[in-house]
Amino acid sequence: MISLKNILYSLAYLALFASSNSALAKPTEKNQLHQLFDQEWQTRMERFPEFAQSMGDSSQADKLTNVSEASQQAWLKSTIKILRALEDITQQDLSNSDKINYQIFKQQLTNRKASLEFKDYQIPFLADSGFHTQIARLPVETEFNNIQDFRDYLKRLSQVPEFFQQNIDNMNAGLRRNFSMPSVVMKGFTDALHQHANGKFDKSVFYQPFDKITLHISKKQQEELRKQAKDIITSDVIASYKNLANYFENTYIPQTKKSMGAYSFPNGKAYYHQKVGEYTTGSMNAEAIHQIGLAEVKRIRAEMNDVMANLEFSGSFAEFLVFLRESPQFYAESPEELLKEASYIAKKMDGQLPKFFTKLPRQPYTVEAVPDSIAAKYTTGRYVSAPLSSTRPGTYWVNTYALDKRPLYVLESLTLHEAVPGHHLQGALNQELADLPNFRRYSYISAFGEGWALYCEKLGIEAGFYQDGYSQFGRLSYEMWRAARLVIDTGIHAFGWSREQAIALLEENSGLSKHNIRTEVDRYISWPGQALSYKIGELKIIELRRLAELKLGEKFDIRLFHDAILENGSIPLDVLQSQIELFIERQLLGTKVAD
């Protein structure tokens, strides 16, 4: 006979055992998930030696990424394996933060799988950049702390011929199946290649680390390093660029496809549909996005007409655009003047940041010109990030090529977008989110990042920028630029638009220079879907701000709203929606909602 006391002990033990098993079950799902994060991250570090070194892992500092077909297929196989393992994890047992991690991880793996299956690596460049320009960043992105760093760097340079040949093999495979860059964007493409191919070794960007070795290295060792650099840069790097230029001019460009749109790729409709989903992180189709773009173009054009009327310009809208594009008063007279003006605007915005954020990044940024070797076909400006551990800051690039095509009236918008509070603030804060898995700290979701940066252009109104009508018109020109992208990208890649149609839309509705318009349209042709990120992301952030203002009323604090937008790093727009709804709930309750 069992006593009541023993029964109670037994029940207590069973309850404790069940509780213990339950407590262990949930971490099991979490542990499995984070093991996959770690596994994928380690695979990524092994696959991309240059990236691994920037993350502090120098175990492959003497190697370049293997981009061969075999390597790409191995990357695909690894991605599929992790995706299958991910699907075995029960999401309902995960915390709120890990549900977000799961969702983003799966989305990134799915996009990578699609990219590898469509064989995007067979077009390893865009109209303005690619593998041939990224490799030229090695001298800047490599940190030289000891003699071994120089030796590893030289070993990397000695692998440039193989690296270029792997890309050539991939491009040849693409040509055989009509998967190539459209010929319309290839004019002038090899100019950047010839800059590397035709100079002397000691004038090459690749030789710059040897111009002045500041480390405590003996003169004999310095002489040995410079001799090796001369031999490798001459025989491996310069010769490879000559070979690559010859390949593009005599083999690749003559065989590129004549049609522009992604729809003409093999399985092109599915390809573009995937890109639309990847870059907007949503489920809208091309037709819906096209119509949103047309509506935004109409709205912004009306605002531009109002600004022009306030300036009391007596001519037509088209004549006003000619005035803006041709009047010397709107252009810098030297690269230095343009860079100084951009730097002043950036510093002015630095002083406004405490009014709009409570959390600011510790990483600084600088302002530099776009490198001469790529400037002619490059976009008007860009932000180049740097790891937190790097001795380099983040960099706001300003294109100083063709100064008469770089109007000052758009410089405020450009600076707020590329530097602060745009890409630098968002990117630097993202890297400081130490509690996030590495795949999130060091990834970039275009709809979020570009949407945020475009939102920041408009935020400049509240920060006291755009004080004269011309800069107001410049801001609207930049907003028109992004609205027109919705029309142009879908028009070209889904509906058969011509390059001339795309150029005309921007020329007739914005104050952008004609040179900039052409380089931008070529970029959209060469990069299906990416141009959709900006306006789609911005519209979502504006929608969420209006929601927060409506629900919170007097409790709305712009600083806390912006903190909430950025506090989870780069995330898909549907995740952003749910997180801002949680933020609103927290603010209304005056407490933190449990994870």
Image (spheres, rainbow, N blue to C red):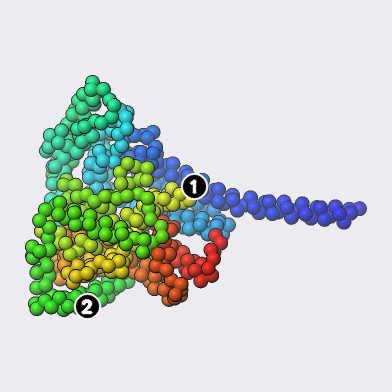
Does residue 466 appear in the picture of this structure?
yes
Residue 491, compared with residue 439, is above or below; it is below
Rounded to the nearest angstrom, the CA distance separating label 1 from label 2 is 51 Å
Instruction: Identify the mark at residue 64; answer none if there is no mark.
Output: none
- Front position in the image: 253 or 112: 112
Residue drawn at (34%, 42%), measured in percent from left and top?
Answer: 390
Mark 1–mark 2 CB contact (< 8 Å): no
Residue 120, compared with residue 311, is above or below; it is above
- Judge left or right: residue 358 versus residue 310: right
What amino acid does circle 2 point to?
Answer: Ala
Q: Count of labels shown?
A: 2
The answer to which of marks 1 and 2 sits earlier in the sequence is 1
Residue drawn at (29%, 50%), measured in percent from left and top?
Answer: 365
| Percent position of residue 165, x then y | 24, 38
| Percent position of residue 377, x then y | 16, 53
- Judge left or right: residue 328 versus residue 357: left
Q: Secondary structure at mark 1?
A: helix
Specify the quadrant of the image occupied by residue 46: top left
Residue drawn at (20%, 63%), measured in percent from left and top?
Answer: 410
- Judge left or right: residue 230 versus residue 120: left
| Percent position of residue 316, x then y | 10, 77
Residue drawn at (20%, 25%), measured in percent from left and top?
Answer: 227
- Front position in the image: 498 or 316: 316
Residue 262, compared with residue 393, is above or below; it is below
The residue labelled by disc 2 is 302
Direction top: furthest residue = 220
The residue labelled by disc 1 is 36
- Judge left or right: residue 8 versus residue 444: right
Instruction: Name the front one of labels 1 and 2.
Output: 2
What amino acid does circle 1 point to?
Answer: Leu
